[in-house]
Amino acid sequence: MTSSPQSPQGKSSDKPQRTVAEWTTFGIASGILGAIAGLVIYAWATEDARPPVVEVQPSPEIREAKGKFYVPFTVSNTGGETVESVQVIAELRVNGQIEESGDQHIDFLSDGETQEGAFIFRRDPRQGNLTVRVASYKLP
Amino acid sequence: MGLAKQWRTELSDLLRGASGGFLFGIPLLYTMEVWWIGSYIGPIRMLLALVLMFGFIFFLNQTAGFRRTSDSRTASALIDSVEAIAIGIVCTGLVLALLQEITLQTPLHEVLGKLIYEGVPFSLGVALANQFLKGDEDPVEETVPPVSKSQSLNATLSDISATLIGATIIAFNIAPTDEIPMLASAASAGWLLLIMAASLLISYCIVFASGFTNYQQRRQQKGIFQRPLSETIASYLVSLIAAMVMLFFFQKLEFGDPWQVWLSYTILLGLPAAVGGSAGRLAI
């Protein structure tokens, strides 16, 4: 980040010289700061300007507990940009009619990030036609 | 100066800086809006934040700083600024990892965003460390006069009240917010134990290891808070009680809630409360 200043030796020696310990700490500190700055520049260089691609995948493993059916899902962003307020909607159709529905909001989804959740139904989703989709998001 | 003494002085300087950082930065470490900003901020803004932070901390280091020997020459202020930011970023990273806001699954740019945006207030605290609680000059060994029983009781009471006041000042800002329930939902037993250990360690460092003001006086302080270890543990318990009362006051905890909720909320708010409590004891 900054070039390390020269040891102010010989000048105004009324102040104590920096000790070995202080120089060691400075070395480690510049290493940390340099690494952070380097990683930010790396993130900048490899920044993905692609628009967000948000997908939701319901799990085939439906869990039943106390007469309710739990359908876990994972929502992931495989695009480049971070999205906010991702709305996931699940609809259970039986004989073409929507019998039950649910929706869920995910606060933030960075590129490459995956979040998990579950929808809960009173009817067995395997008896009908379950659709889980991402309905909307907004850009931060 | 011997090498061992050099390292002791250096460690004490670094801990003093970190303590100042905790005092100033802990409320924002418990603010979800700052985590969110870190999640979506772009790399250019991050670089800008780093540069601005460096400039501001450089100016602070020319007047305040965190080292006992205040050397305001430009070169020294530059070196101290690099160190203040590094202390800020390391401590912020540790606390965010402890709160599980940074995990192994967090994408790189999100980690960087959170580290930098949470690191800013923390590093300001590092650079202001001497200003918060002025360091005493070279400590001298002093003889401890014998104390009577009533003095000992008074000292204990004043320690307890100082811890309560400090804990309340810092944790009152955090108690009514949604961060505590949110963090608690992700914290398992192991994490809670780690948070307890961190609270004790930070509290110990602020009072005893960082050589802040009244250090010698603290050693003379009588009462049940006499030894560093017992003082740290006793004041942590006081901070936990303060945290619990604050959570109850803001109705984040109700009598009907399961005891696990009481426990996890209290331990999570106990960290900022312990930081405040330690500062409170230094102020008396």
Image (tube, rainbow, N blue to C red):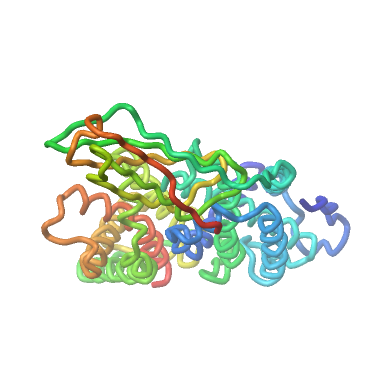
Residue furthest out toward the top:
A61
Front position in the image: B145 or A17 = A17
Rendering quarter of residue B65: bottom right
Residue drawn at the location 88% of the way across and 57% of the way down: A10
Residue B139, image x and y in percent?
53, 61
Coordinates of residue B61 in the picture (x, y in percent): 68, 66
Q: Is residue B14 left or right of residue B97?
A: right
Residue most toward the front?
A96
Image-based side of A56 in relation to B113, left or right: left
The image position of residue B96, as x and y in percent, is 47, 49
* Residue B98 position by quadrant: top left
Q: Nearer the viewer, residue B248 or A31?
A: B248
| Side of B64 relative to B149 (left or right) | right
Furthest toward the right, the residue is A10
In the rendered image, the quadrant that contains the C terminus of chain B is bottom left
- Residue A25 visible somewhere in the drawing: no
Query: Residue at 57% of width from left, 43% of height from top?
Result: A111
What residue sits 64% from the left and 55% below the top? B85
* Relative depth, front residue between A92 and B2: A92
Q: Position of residue B206 (x, y in %)?
A: 46, 57
> Would you identify the image quadrant in which residue B37 lies?
bottom right
| Residue B200 visible to the viewer | yes
Write the residue at 21% across / 65% down: B248
